[in-house]
């Protein structure tokens, strides 16, 4: 695949290839179409525990920034939190159907819902659809 793949408007994107959809005071999180295409066929998703406190991904990466892991036929990759906060909900469908990350990364394949702790400040660290598309073009 060339380019960023599908990059819906109205979402926020991280340099680690996660997306965020703001839903009132909560934030739904998943991996981007670009990330799932690079991973290949997803066979298992490790979800975070509800109640886990996470921090926005930054360098160096640490366990407190992880919202789980995505295992494909190629590799196991950590999924990093694009925002700091508390995990409020996880996607139980991914336990039975991890391939939803491949087939529906922005809808059925979401990973978790966070209650952000510093939303306004941290959103400034993320990219919009155009910014993310430009970022991925530089990686190609």
Image (cartoon, rainbow, N blue to C red):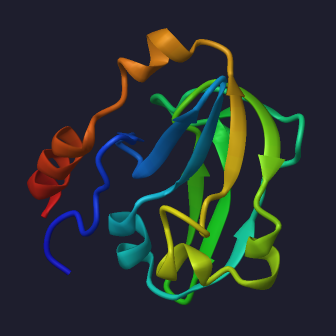
Q: Residue at x 14, y 75 (%)?
A: 2
| x then y, percent, for residue 139 | 16, 56
| x then y, percent, for residue 101 | 55, 73
| x then y, percent, for residue 62 | 63, 36
Q: Is residue 128 left or right of residue 60?
A: left
Q: How many marks?
A: 0
Q: Is residue 47 left or right of residue 84?
A: right
Which of 55 and 103 lies nearest the eye of the viewer? 103
Q: Quadrant of the N terminus?
A: bottom left
Vertical side of 134 occupied by 101: above or below: below
Q: Residue at x 35, y 40 (%)?
A: 10
The quadrant holding residue 3 is bottom left
Vertical side of 77 occupied by 24: above or below: above
Q: Is residue 79 left or right of residue 20?
A: right
Which of 5 and 59 lies nearest the eye of the viewer? 5
Q: Residue at x 66, y 23 (%)?
A: 25
Q: Quadrant of the C terminus?
A: bottom left
The quadrant holding residue 98 is bottom right
Q: Is residue 3 left or right of residue 18?
A: left
Q: Residue at x 36, y 30 (%)?
A: 126
């Amino acid at each position: 695949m060339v380019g960023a793949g599908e990059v819906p408007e109205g979402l926020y994107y991280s340099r680690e290839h996660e997306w965020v959809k703001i839903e009132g005071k909560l934030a739904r999180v998943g991996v981007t179409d670009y990330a799932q295409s690079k991973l290949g066929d997803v066979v298992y998703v490790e979800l975070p525990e509800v109640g886990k406190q996470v921090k926005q991904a930054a360098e160096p990466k640490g366990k407190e920034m992880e919202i789980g892991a995505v295992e494909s036929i190629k590799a196991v990759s950590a999924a990093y939190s694009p925002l700091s906060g508390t995990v409020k909900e996880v996607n139980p469908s991914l336990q039975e159907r991890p391939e939803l990350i491949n087939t529906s990364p922005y809808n059925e394949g979401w990973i978790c819902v966070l209650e952000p702790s510093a939303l306004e400040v941290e959103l400034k660290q993320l990219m919009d659809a155009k910014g993310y598309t430009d970022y991925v073009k530089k990686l190609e």
